Image (cartoon, grey):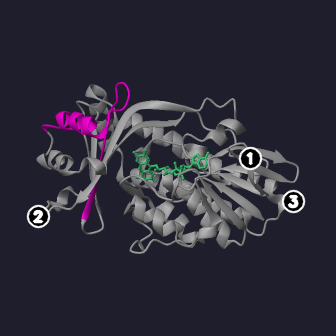
């Protein structure tokens, strides 16, 4: 089958690789001038690692599928796209709209048809234009009122390793700091705090964060200060205002953030995109132009309940983490009272598709 994938983020690339390996004639359209993933580190949870494994993209050095992997985003993107032949990838092509017909879908960019496909996978990210066309009555995105700052830097010598792979939350401000090693030589940190107004640039965001965290463990401010501005990314966190009622429309399927953009609090955005890519590949293996719509309905039936559930859980987690004062004390008391077995079972439900 001829399959067009729109958007070469982590989700689109994973889907293109899976569908190519399944024997389909894949074309990947990316609006950016080159293939790359901006950002710092990313935590890929065990469910995401397993999905990549089934797509034939096991991550070297992360053979332990039961634990999260912390990876440089650019490295992850490079590793995922490596099996894609160059001639399948078309960069600098912003897909404007899709025109579905009885025997296929025409892909339009800058007012002209650029491809005709038996199926189209819309992996055009959180601000998905194609989602807006397919589901015009969906309310789109909502702001969570949170700002995330992320940075990566070389690992300082003599670092207190007890502080690695930790997350700290401040009950006074609801701010959060997380720190993880990336390989042996680098560190990935992230913060989450309330955002009032438009998101500031990297330098101003760093200044605000340093003042908010001035009396935290000294390592927190030292690491934020030591990170080069060019390695700091600022995001105003948005997510889908409501879950979608379908991830498919005829021969078109949504995947990744286009289908279920969620707050990053559970570290599941990319993991869910990888689960989408693995499920899509499975359902479209052996499919032909005549049964593609029916196969995509099976993809929707498998993926939507789980991904929408995780999206709701991520929103709940975001609200819970950002609580302050008495509500934050009550949260921590309650969390301490949760039996370990129950907490482990909840985590297992997330990490096992
Ligand atoms: C602060 C922060 C921290 C996060 N941390 C984690 C984490 O630790 N773990 C995790 O699993 N997830 C995390 N996430 C979520 C994760 O980054 C996303 O879920 C994931 O990257 C989504 O991938 P995607 O391919 O769906 O979309 P994107 O990565 O947004 O890719 C979409 C691609 O489509 C292209 N595109 C858009 N429109 C068009 C068009 N019209 N035509 C052609 N191309 C187009 C874009 O240029 C882009 O390349 C985090 C998110 C944030 C904001």
22 is higher (above) or lower (below) than 318: below
Residue 112 is tagged as: 1
Which residue is tagged 3? 290
Q: Can residue 275 be seen in this view?
A: no
Task: Give the left or right position of residue 96, taking residue 55 as reference.
Answer: right
Tell me if residue 114 is in the magenta stretch. Answer: no
Could you say where residue 193 lies in the image, as x and y percent from the top left? 31, 35
The residues colored magenta run: 186-215
Residue 242, image quadrant: top right
Q: Nearer the viewer, mark 3 or mark 1?
A: 1
Tell me which residue sits at (66%, 69%) in the image.
Answer: 20
Which badge, 3 or 1, comes first in the chain's sequence?
Answer: 1
- Tag 1: Cα neighbours inside 10 Å, few (<14), some, or many (≥20)? few
Task: Give the left or right position of residue 68, taking residue 182 as reference.
Answer: right
Quick check: is the Cβ at mark 3 less than 8 Å away from ligand 1? Answer: no
Say which element carries label 1: strand
């Amino acid at each position: 089958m001829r399959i067009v994938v729109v958007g070469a983020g982590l989700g689109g690339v994973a889907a293109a690789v899976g569908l190519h390996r399944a024997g389909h004639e894949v074309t990947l359209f990316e609006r950016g001038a080159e293939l790359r993933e901006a950002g710092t580190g990313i935590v890929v949870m065990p469910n995401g690692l397993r999905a990549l494994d089934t797509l034939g993209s096991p991550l070297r050095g992360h053979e332990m599928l039961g634990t999260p992997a912390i990876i440089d985003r650019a490295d992850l993107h490079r590793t995922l796209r490596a099996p894609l032949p160059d001639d399948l990838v078309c960069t600098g092509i912003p897909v404007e709209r899709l025109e579905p017909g009885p025997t296929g879908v025409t892909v339009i960019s800058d007012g002209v048809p650029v491809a005709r496909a038996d199926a189209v996978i819309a992996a055009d990210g959180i601000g998905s234009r194609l989602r807006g066309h397919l589901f015009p009555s969906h309310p789109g995105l909502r702001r969570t009122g949170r700002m995330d700052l992320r940075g990566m830097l070389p690992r300082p010598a003599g670092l207190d390793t007890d502080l690695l792979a930790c997350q700290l939350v401040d009950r006074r401000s609801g701010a959060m700091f997380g720190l993880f090693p990336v390989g042996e030589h680098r560190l990935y940190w992230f913060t989450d705090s309330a955002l009032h107004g438009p998101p500031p640039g990297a330098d101003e965001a760093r200044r605000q964060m340093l003042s908010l965290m001035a009396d935290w463990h000294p390592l927190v401010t030292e690491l934020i200060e030591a990170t080069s501005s060019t390695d700091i990314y600022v995001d105003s966190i948005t997510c889908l205002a409501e879950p979608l009622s379908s991830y498919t429309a005829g021969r078109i399927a949504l995947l990744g953030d286009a289908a279920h953009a969620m707050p990053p609090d559970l570290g599941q955005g990319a993991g869910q995109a990888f689960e989408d890519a693995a499920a899509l590949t499975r359902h479209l293996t052996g499919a032909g132009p005549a049964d593609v719509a029916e196969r995509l309905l099976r993809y929707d039936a498998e993926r939507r309940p789980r991904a929408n559930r995780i999206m709701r859980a991520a929103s709940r987690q975001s609200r819970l983490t950002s609580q302050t004062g008495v509500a934050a004390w009550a949260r921590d008391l309650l969390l301490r009272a949760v039996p370990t077995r129950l907490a482990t079972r909840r985590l297992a439900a997330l990490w096992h598709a």
